[in-house]
Image (spheres, helix red, strand yellow):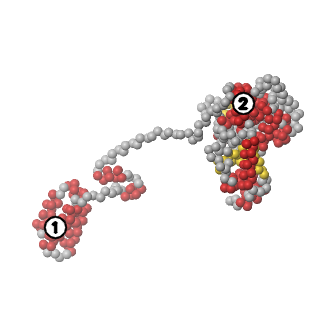
């Protein structure tokens, strides 16, 4: 028995130290099993020698088995939570320090423009006067554009009728909506206005099953206004094939911008609103300007088109709306002429617009008796008036001490009721006055 144990000790001593360290758990298990067997089973010396020899052979063969490649975790808790990476764990188990990982090369971010670059228009004519005249012929209202507006009004009526059968739908187009141009979707040429009483809107929302009921909407007219626009937009998108573009509920005149059915890249966009008076006022002013002075209508369309193509009439970005650009053009024709004679009268001289604004019969107001100049010989062209328009607001107009008032039609300081608009430059260095319109 003692001889057998001595042989076992010699064999264990001959084992490679590193291999023994790696296989300690297996040898320990084998020896413990043999010790238990010796203590409990009454065996003879030959039997014990054979059993011990078999255990040692098994342990010796097990040392040369190939290791299974798997994920070894240094700390089970950290491994479960993903604190250690596999390479770091293997390095910690083998006793070698983890090599610093190579930093990935950061590729330079290359941003592409989200919109198609705007190309300059091409003209057949040569010279400033000829090019402006050609552009005006393209943007003036046409029968095709009017028919397009009528078709859109009919589509809106059919979609809204099941929801609000008592509502009236009107369409207005400033310029030629059939002709595509830059920022045509961002600043639509067409306005569709739904006119309906608040009581009818409430009944329609109740039939539609508005979440939360209509008790809150009765107390807040603005929320009722927005709820009506949302409900009508749902009808137009689901029933008539319109596509939703964006909403402008934070503005004073809430509305949504939609794309007409079947529109793709050459999209025809429109602004849809409920009980809005601005499109009506804009259309009335444009019509009466054309009746009083044809060049006035041309200048208004030219200014609006210029502001849109220059990207400075997008209300969502804080720009002046197209209606404000119309008022700037009208005011210039009233009070900005270099010779002092206005081409347009004050608002009281606009019969329809004055009635809409509640200013009819106010000709006794100071300056309202002045009539527009009717000289036909040597009159300035629309192209020349556009140049004077830019010069007037760039150099002559005093933004701090004057206000644009179509009602007065003359240069005067702003009224106390008008808010003071101030521009704060991003780079600092003082403030600048902004127009009060």
Circle 2 sits on which residue?
133
Please state which of residues 346 and 415 is positioned toward the viewer in this rendering: 346
Q: Position of residue 99 (x, y in %)?
A: 33, 45
Quarter of the picture containing the N terminus is: bottom left
* Residue at x 78%, y 51% (from the top left corner): 168
Pick whichever, 68 or 344, lies toward us: 344
* The image quarter in which residue 407 lies: top right
Q: Residue furthest left?
A: 3
Dot 2 lies on which element?
A: helix
Q: Are the two marked residues, 2 and 1, in contact with CB atoms closer than 8 angstroms?
A: no
**Most extreme residue toward the front, as rendered?**
124
Q: Is any part of residue 409 visible from this angle?
A: no
How many neighbours does mark 1 have within 10 angstroms: few (below 14), some (14-19), or many (20 or more)? some
- In the image, 115 versus 154, the foreground residue is 154
Dot 1 falls on a residue whose secondary structure is helix
Q: CA distance from mark 2 to mark 1?
A: 112 Å
Earlier sequence position, callout 2 versus callout 1: 1
> Residue 24: x, y in percent?
24, 60
């Amino acid at each position: 028995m003692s001889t057998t144990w001595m042989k076992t000790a010699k064999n264990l001593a001959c084992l490679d130290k590193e291999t023994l360290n790696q296989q300690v758990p297996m040898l320990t298990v084998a020896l413990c099993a043999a010790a238990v067997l010796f203590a409990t089973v009454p065996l003879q010396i030959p039997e014990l020698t054979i059993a011990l020899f078999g255990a040692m052979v098994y342990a010796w063969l097990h040392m040369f088995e190939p290791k299974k490649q798997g994920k070894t975790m240094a700390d089970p808790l950290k491994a479960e939570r993903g604190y250690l990476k596999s390479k770091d764990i293997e390095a910690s188990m083998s006793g070698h320090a983890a090599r610093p990982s190579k930093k990935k090369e950061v590729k330079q971010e290359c941003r592409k423009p989200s919109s198609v670059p705007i190309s300059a228009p091409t003209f057949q004519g040569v010279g400033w006067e000829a090019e402006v005249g050609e552009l005006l012929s393209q943007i003036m209202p046409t029968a095709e554009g009017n028919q397009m507006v009528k078709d859109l009004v009919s589509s809106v009526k059919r979609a809204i009728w099941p929801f609000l059968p008592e509502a009236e739908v009107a369409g207005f187009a400033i310029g030629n909506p059939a002709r595509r141009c830059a920022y045509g979707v961002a600043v639509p040429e067409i306005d569709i206005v739904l006119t309906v009483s608040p009581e009818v809107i409430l009944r329609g929302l109740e039939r539609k099953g508005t979440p939360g009921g209509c008790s809150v909407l009765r107390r807040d007219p603005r929320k009722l206004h927005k709820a009506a626009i949302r409900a009508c937009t749902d009808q137009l998108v689901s029933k008539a094939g319109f596509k939703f573009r964006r909403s402008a509920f934070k503005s004073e005149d809430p509305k949504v911008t939609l794309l007409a059915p079947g529109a793709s890249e050459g999209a025809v966009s429109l602004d849809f609103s409920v009980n809005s008076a601005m499109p009506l006022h804009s259309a009335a002013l444009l019509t009466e300007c054309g009746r009083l002075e044809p060049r006035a209508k041309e200048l208004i369309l030219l200014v609006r088109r210029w502001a849109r193509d220059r990207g400075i009439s997008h209300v969502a970005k804080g720009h002046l709306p197209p209606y404000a650009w119309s008022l700037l053009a009208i005011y210039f024709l009233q009070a900005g002429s270099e010779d002092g004679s206005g081409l347009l009268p004050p608002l009281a001289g606009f019969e329809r617009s004055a009635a809409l604004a509640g200013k009819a019969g106010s000709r006794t107001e100071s300056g309202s008796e002045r009539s527009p100049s009717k000289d036909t010989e040597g009159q300035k062209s629309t192209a020349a008036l556009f140049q004077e328009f830019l010069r007037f607001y760039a150099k002559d107009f005093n933004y701090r001490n004057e206000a644009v008032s179509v009602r007065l039609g003359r240069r005067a300081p702003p009224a106390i009721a008008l808010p003071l608009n101030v521009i704060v430059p991003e780079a600092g260095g003082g403030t600048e006055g902004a127009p009060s319109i």
